[in-house]
Amino acid sequence: MAQQTAAESFSIGGDWGDLYIDGEWRQASEGGTLDVANPATRETIATVPAGTSADVEAAYEAAVAAQPEWAAQPPQERAGVIQAAMGALDAYSEGLAGILVAEGGSTQMKAHVELEQLAPGMMAEAASFPTRAQGTHANSVIPGRENEVHREPAGVVGVITPWNFPFHLSMRVVAPAIALGNSVVLKPAPETPIGGGLALARLFEAAGLPSGVLNVVPGGTEPGEAIASHPNNDVVSFTGSSAVGTDVAEAASRNLALPALELGGNNPQVVLADADLDRAVDAGVFGSFMHQGQVCISINRHLVHESLADEYTERLADRAEVLAIGDPADGADIGPIINESQRDAMMEYVEESVAEGAEVVTGGEGNELFVEPTVLREVTNEMAVSCNEHFGPIVPVIPFGDDKEAISIANDTDYGLAASVFSTDLGRAKRVAGRIEAGMVHINDQPINDEPHVPFGGVKDSGLGRYNGEAIMRELTEQRWVSIQHEPREYPI
């Protein structure tokens, strides 16, 4: 790498021209490169290596070789590396925030939430894992026997992450995996290869992580497929669409690797007849427009009691109209959509829904990669904007008549990631929440919530397994039964 100051090396202007394998920064095996564009300006802001299946193979060779020695390190050694990486994150957070803004179109608020709350919270939790991953002692049904159940690292973890919260969604697997004694091969999304991958490698390099424990191979489909199907995987973690997640799970399962999947969502916010409308509207604005709606747990559908639907819709539209749209580097509230295909899909959903009878109250237009915050009424659950994960700054408001109908509409989807329920009657809200088919339900709050010690994940087509806390510890470790026969045993033959 060219000579740079430490701060410069953790900025968008840093030298990101190499991938990271076995503790070395090296060129991709075939010399290919990938241009990284700023979605707000459409300008190329960096060029990174485009890894190949050969690079993935080299990464797994390094990971397999490094893992046993790393697992054998004392718990405080593994915890110390995570803590050192947290220190580096704190020291260079401003430069890293600039990467998230320029590379992924993050607003300033979202970038700082990701780097100052979400990721460090998960890293702090992970730093406790080496001493928490304890075994148990179990009584035996055999006289004179002692049973020990050991908790050990799974081994090698393949990680494929998306572009929307690239740093956090990579770190929430990488930090726990490393803390628990695993080694990792990470492929970030091609839209955000720095914030989702190479920046993590640089942080852990600064933290003193031994060579080969973390390997980062940017690129497109080729390295992704090679990681998902690699025979040396013990766990494959994937965050992304349900369609791709199904393929990843199938590829991992062929090698008997555990698939850990957080997939798509079609998340409802249910506003019951007795809801506090001020709170529901505030939550609706944040839950729909945070990061331009490009959040797996954002509100995809607003289900509002028919007595409140008109006022709720108008108030959300009023709030949407004052949000500043533009380059997040200039402080805009609403930044760009990540790419043309995402923008085109969400605009098509709006157009199809309008053709089916929905009415645009505000927004509905796009310019370049910027999409106006859009509020629609006269929407049904069958319309394109409702039955698809639109992943944009779009608010379809669907009225309902009673709690039973609200629950029916909320569950009328293949997804089951997150949901929210608003009511001033806590018992009523709990009853409704308990009948919604989702892995996470929030009462009197919107669904964009993630706490490092609470299980995170979905049901139905929204994934397999859970992240965070004890849940991710179970995903990334295996139990091993060791029995000790202290006294001679009598056998039947």
Image (spheres, grey):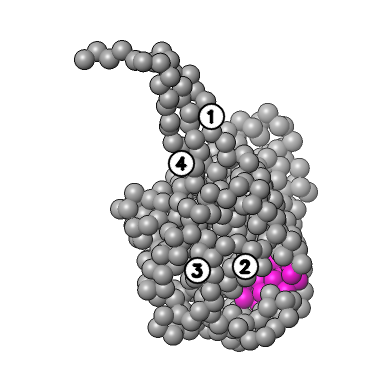
**Residue 32 relative to residue 119: left or right:** left
Disc 1: CA contacts within 10 A as few (<14), some (14-19) or many (>=20): few
Mark number displayed over residue 205? 2
Give the alpha-carbon distance from disc 1 to disc 3, as whole Å.
34 Å
Asked whether the viewer can see residue 401, the reply is no
**Residue type pointed to by label 4:** Glu
Q: Quadrant of residue 329?
A: bottom right
**Of the residues under marks 2 and 4, which one precedes in the sequence?**
2
Look at the image and say whether residue 95 sits in the magenta stretch.
yes
Query: In what element is the residue under mark 2?
Result: helix
Q: Secondary structure at mark 4?
A: strand
Q: Residues within 10 Å of mark 4 (few under 14, many from 20)?
A: some
Q: Mark 2 vs mark 4: give the one in front.
A: 2
Rendered residue at 54%/77% (across/down): 25
- State if disc 1 and disc 2 touch (CB < 8 Å): no
Tell me how far mark 2 sits from mark 4, CA to CA: 27 Å
Helix, strand or loop at label 1? It is strand
Residue on which the image places disc 4:
478
Determine which residue is flagged by label 3: 22
Q: Which residues are magenta?
A: 92-111
Question: CA–CA distance between discs 2 and 3?
Answer: 11 Å
Q: Nearer the viewer, residue 420 or 480?
A: 480
